Amino acid sequence: MNMIEGHVAFDPAPGIPVWDIDPYDAAILRDPFPYYAGLRERGPLVYIPRYSVLAAGQYDTTREIFSDHERFVSSRGVGLNDFRHGTPWRKPSIILEVDPPDHARTRKVMARALSPKAIAAFRETFRETAETLVDQVLAKGRIEAVAELAEAFPTTVFPRAVGMTDSDPRRLVDYGAMVFNAMGPDNALRRDAMARQADIVPWITAACGRARLTGEGLGAIIYAAADAGEITEDEAGMLVRSFLSAGVDTTVTGIGNMLWCLSQNPAEYDRLKHDPALIRPAIEEMLRFTSPVHTFARTADRQTTVAGLPIPEGAKIICVLGAANSDPQKWGDPERYRVDRRPQGHMGFGAGIHGCVGQNIARAEIEALLTAMIARVDRIEPAGAAVWRPGNAIRSLDRLPLTFVAS
Ligand code: OVV
């Protein structure tokens, strides 16, 4: 068997366009829109020889593959490595990297912990933290928004929401970088993120133990499910690990991308100020417009066809959510950020049974920050060039210098 990036290499069926590109090249990850367009233009599926994968970027095809958990499984990994043919870098997630029927049991417990009702308990601390942070930022005027807002807010509120007794913002952010860069090829991004594995992984594992969590919060809800016999004690630790894996880098990215959208589109920020009911739609539009998670993969667990094109068993398919979210066949003026678009059906949180289980708390964090901002901040202006940080699965900012002007 000829293996490539941890999966079995295959040849594309006749009729599938071949595109000799490296979608994980740093330059493309920094400015992915020409690649997104190239993917969509070539057809519903494109074969990328460098990694022997199929790529989907048209909205309908990406949605079809992402929504069909029977043909396109997650249990073989949602990155380029096929867990059937190699050992994953960490124990597979028991909610992300699993199929039905196992998935339903863990998903149910996570959905309970992250339900709108459970999340409502955090509203007040989210609001207070947001107000304090925004006041600090206004006192400074000029800030580096990635560190001072995008990282500062989730790393303050999220460990508390989980009930962690001992947090470490740097390790939490860097663990997220490992988890998401591990989904890509064995490139410099993945290797650099993995370099701190020996320091970070044992800390994360220990932080997930029952003894390290308070009796309140998301962690306690998960351990209560263990007490009720729904899951085992080990599984509870694994689900807490999923909070730490998926809950930090993603929201850091969402907030950074949100501030970028609004600083680049001052008229849209003005509309938010005059109509706070647009905060929720503005968040959805940020998710569509910037696709914080730009790519997740699936594995075909049988021979099948999509859009009439044959796919062999074992094929890795990268689903380019960023391309689906900017498909002009689906969206009018996709390259415009509009707070009142209400982009129903965007793929920012994925789709199907694996659709983001944390989306309520993610929205609540961003909403708290925007609510505090529109009450206090008249304008957000760029104070230097925004710099994107290449990531194998996440598209986030590396630097975002901004000036905040008080109302
Ligand atoms: C959605 C997501 C991303 C990364 C990690 C996990 C989930 C997990 O469950 O570990």
Image (spheres, helix red, strand yellow):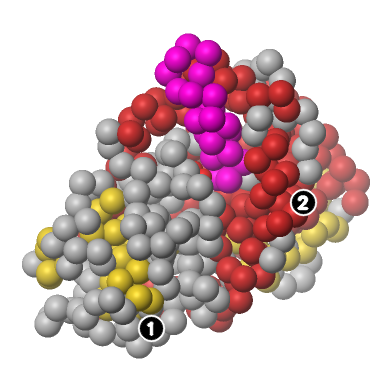
| Quarter of the picture holding the C terminus | top right
Q: Residue at x 63, y 45 (%)?
A: 248
What is the residue that sits farthest to the left in this orientation? 308
Residue 246 sits inside the magenta stretch: yes
Residue 270 sits inside the magenta stretch: no
Q: What numbered label is drawn on residue 217?
A: none
Q: Quadrant of residue 122?
A: top right
Question: Is 210 left or right of 341, judged from the image as shown?
Answer: right
Label located before the other in sequence (2 or 1): 1
Q: Residue beneath label 2, please?
A: 170
Residue 87 in the image: state x and y as whole percent. Answer: 45, 58
Q: Nearer the viewer, residue 203 or 375?
A: 203
Q: Residue beneath label 1, please?
A: 50
79 lies above or below 339: below
Residue 82 in the image: state x and y as whole percent. Answer: 36, 61
Q: Nearer the viewer, residue 359 or 207?
A: 207
Indicate the secondary structure of the residue bearing disc 1.
Answer: loop
Q: Residue at x 29, y 59 (%)?
A: 299
Residue 163 in the image: state x and y as whole percent. Answer: 69, 26
Q: Residue at x 42, y 18 (%)?
A: 230
Q: Quick check: marks 2 and 1 in contact, CB under 8 Å?
A: no
Looking at the rendered structure, the kind of residue marked 2 is Arg
Residue 325 visible from this viewpoint:
no
Residue 151 in the image: state x and y as whole percent. Answer: 73, 49
Question: Is 32 left or right of 331, judged from the image as shown?
Answer: right
Q: Which residues are magenta?
A: 226-247
| Quarter of the picture holding the N terminus | bottom left
